[in-house]
Image (cartoon, coloured by chain):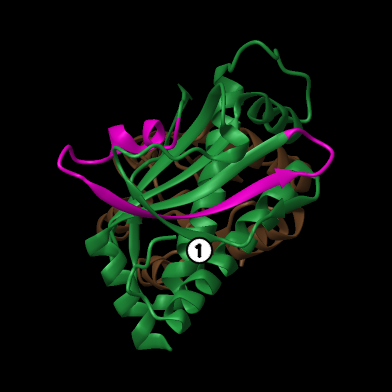
Chain colours: A green, B brown
């Protein structure tokens, strides 16, 4: 990771703050699917919008993306990304019924949107609680995107002039299922600075 | 007893309806997909109780709670939301919500939610 000028203590506090939220999201996913869920420790990555970055488990094919903008105390986007076949398996698990494996119907989309909404709010709400800030959210949306690299998953969410963003990501897998995904928080540098200032005030 | 579920997610409405009817089979349940729809249903259906989500299109749950309070509507409202922020919970309480329950709603939370409505 490129040096962000963040002290080791502050970076540790930032990732631990995110980790608590990610743990909460994992618990919700586990509760709704009835399957053990593994989530990696979050990492912070600097990303130039024109620089390809691949996400190992989503390297090829179509990705289900749920995106939710947050604003007020902090401005950015939270994403939940799942491989297409994994998303269908998750829908099947939470609907407890067979679904058409070739299509995402309204029922499956509604179920996945609600699940991802719960997970994203678990992460962001936990961070907000720890930092004593208040976040407001737009209604989340879901789409399927063919991706070559991470830029394809965020380019349409960002202003044209955006050059560099920072994201915190945690990888997730569901045991015994081929479900791979990421929870991602996307911030520009100004909002990363805001986040770090809030955090520095707390530690 | 008539209860209004307000949530933009058809999946969330369906799951909540199933869980509520399992806990209380004689409930009469009506549904609304946002705050505006809910205000109309309160007038037309006259529910005793209401369970509302927060993040919704057209009119969100906070605005809905505010309208219920401002208009003095005789319906008891609890919030069921994925938004786990403590400040948001406090805001809902100040606007008159009788309870706040975090999604996902387990059977135990449904029991608590019904108790909050009926208390």
Residue plotted at (41% across, 34% down):
A153
Residue plotted at (38% across, 61% down):
A2
Q: Is B43 or A10 nearer to us in this picture? A: A10
Left or right: B52 in relation to B60: right
Left or right: A37 in relation to A139: right
Q: Which residue is mark 1?
A: B84
Q: Is A141 or A77 nearer to us in this picture? A: A77
Q: Position of residue B118 (x, y in %)?
A: 62, 61
Residue plotted at (84% across, 39% down):
A176
Q: Is A82 rendered above or below residue B47?
A: above
Disc 1 crowd rating (10 Å Cα; few below 14, some 14-19, many 20+) is many
Output the chain of dot 1: B
Residue plotted at (59% across, 69% down):
A20
* Residue A32 figure quarter: top right
State yes or no: residue A177 in magenta.
yes
Left or right: B83 in relation to B114: left
Q: Is B10 or A130 nearer to us in this picture? A: A130
Residues shaded magenta: A149-178
Residue B79 visible in the picture: no
* Residue A59 figure quarter: top right
Q: Is A200 rendered above or below residue B96?
A: below
Q: Quadrant of the N terminus of chain A?
A: bottom left
State yes or no: residue A45 in magenta.
no
SS state under label 1 = loop
Q: Position of residue A17 (x, y in %)?
A: 51, 72
Q: Residue furthest right?
A: A176
């Amino acid at each position: 990771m490129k040096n962000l000028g963040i002290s080791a203590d502050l970076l540790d506090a930032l990732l631990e703050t995110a980790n608590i939220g990610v743990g909460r999201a994992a618990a919700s996913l586990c509760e709704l699917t009835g399957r053990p869920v593994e989530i990696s420790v979050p990492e912070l990555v600097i990303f130039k919008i024109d620089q390809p970055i691949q996400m190992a488990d989503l390297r090829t094919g179509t990705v289900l993306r749920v995106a939710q903008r947050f604003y007020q105390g902090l401005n950015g986007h939270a994403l939940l990304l799942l491989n297409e076949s994994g998303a269908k398996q998750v829908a099947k698990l939470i609907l407890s019924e067979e679904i058409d494996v070739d299509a995402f119907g309204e029922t499956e989309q509604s179920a996945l949107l609600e699940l991802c909404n719960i997970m994203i709010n678990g992460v962001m709400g936990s961070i907000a609680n720890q930092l004593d800030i208040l976040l407001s959210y737009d209604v989340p949306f879901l789409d399927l995107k063919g991706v070559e690299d991470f830029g394809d998953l965020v380019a349409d969410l960002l202003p044209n002039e955006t050059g560099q963003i920072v994201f915190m990501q945690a990888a997730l897998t569901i045991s015994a299922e081929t479900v791979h995904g990421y929870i991602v928080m996307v911030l520009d540098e100004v909002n990363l600075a805001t986040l770090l200032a809030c955090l520095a005030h707390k530690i | 007893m008539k209860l209004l579920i307000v949530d933009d997610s058809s999946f969330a409405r369906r799951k909540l309806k199933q869980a509520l009817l399992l806990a209380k089979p004689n409930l009469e349940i009506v549904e609304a997909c946002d705050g505006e729809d809910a205000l109309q249903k309160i007038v037309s259906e006259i529910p005793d109780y209401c369970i509302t989500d927060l993040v919704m299109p057209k009119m969100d749950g906070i605005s809905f709670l505010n309208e219920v309070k401002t208009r003095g509507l005789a319906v008891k409202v609890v919030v069921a939301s994925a938004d786990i922020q403590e400040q948001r919970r406090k805001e809902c309480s100040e606007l008159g919500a009788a309870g706040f329950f975090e999604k996902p709603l387990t059977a135990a939370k449904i029991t608590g939610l019904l108790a909050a409505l009926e208390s």
